[in-house]
Amino acid sequence: MFSCTCYLFSTNSQSWEKGRQDCRDRGADLVIIDSSEEQEFLTKNIRKDTWIGLTDRDNEGTWKWTDETPLTLAYWWTKQPDSGGGDPQWGEEDCAHFIYGTKMTENWNDQRCDAALQWICEKIT
């Protein structure tokens, strides 16, 4: 619990979409981060790279949360998001995740949505 929200930190690793479906099956969704306090709480509790509910799959470069709200508060890692830098080996990087072990103020990265990472579900109580 943090504030009036329950979180589930998965121990499994799957694609962004499968992580999101797991959250939905639990009556929740992938986490939407809307304050520096929430960002700090989540950063302190992750143990691996972890999906968050942010994507630009609908429109490259326009990042939106799973509830369709636009990104206004961001904690991107240096030179991110970069959609793989145009290098075909990385493919399209349209889903966002926490990078474990980096500074709270810059620990988001864009990644291929089919990469296998853990995820965080959020349910407002």
Image (cartoon, grey):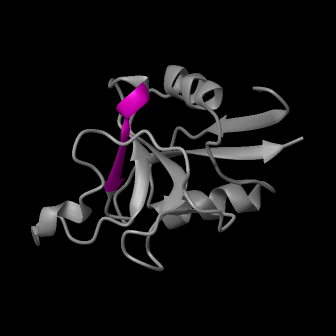
Answer above or below: position of 114 versus 5.
below
Answer above or below: position of 1 versus 56.
above
Residue 81: x %, y % from top left: 30, 55
Quadrant of the rendered image containing residue 96: bottom left
Residue 48: x %, y % from top left: 40, 33
Tell me what residue is drawn at x 65 percent, y 63 percent: 69
Tell me what residue is drawn at x 36 percent, y 42 percent: 76
Quadrant of the rendered image containing residue 64: bottom right
Answer above or below: position of 57 versus 39.
below
Residue 26: x %, y % from top left: 77, 54
Residue 2: x %, y % from top left: 75, 26
Instruction: Based on the picture, tell me whether residue 85 belongs to the magenta stretch.
Output: no
- Residue farthest toward the bottom in the current orientation of the protein: 58
Tell me what residue is drawn at x 52 percent, y 20 percent: 44
In the image, 15 versus 94, the foreground residue is 94
The magenta segment: 105-110
In the image, 35 versus 122, the foreground residue is 35
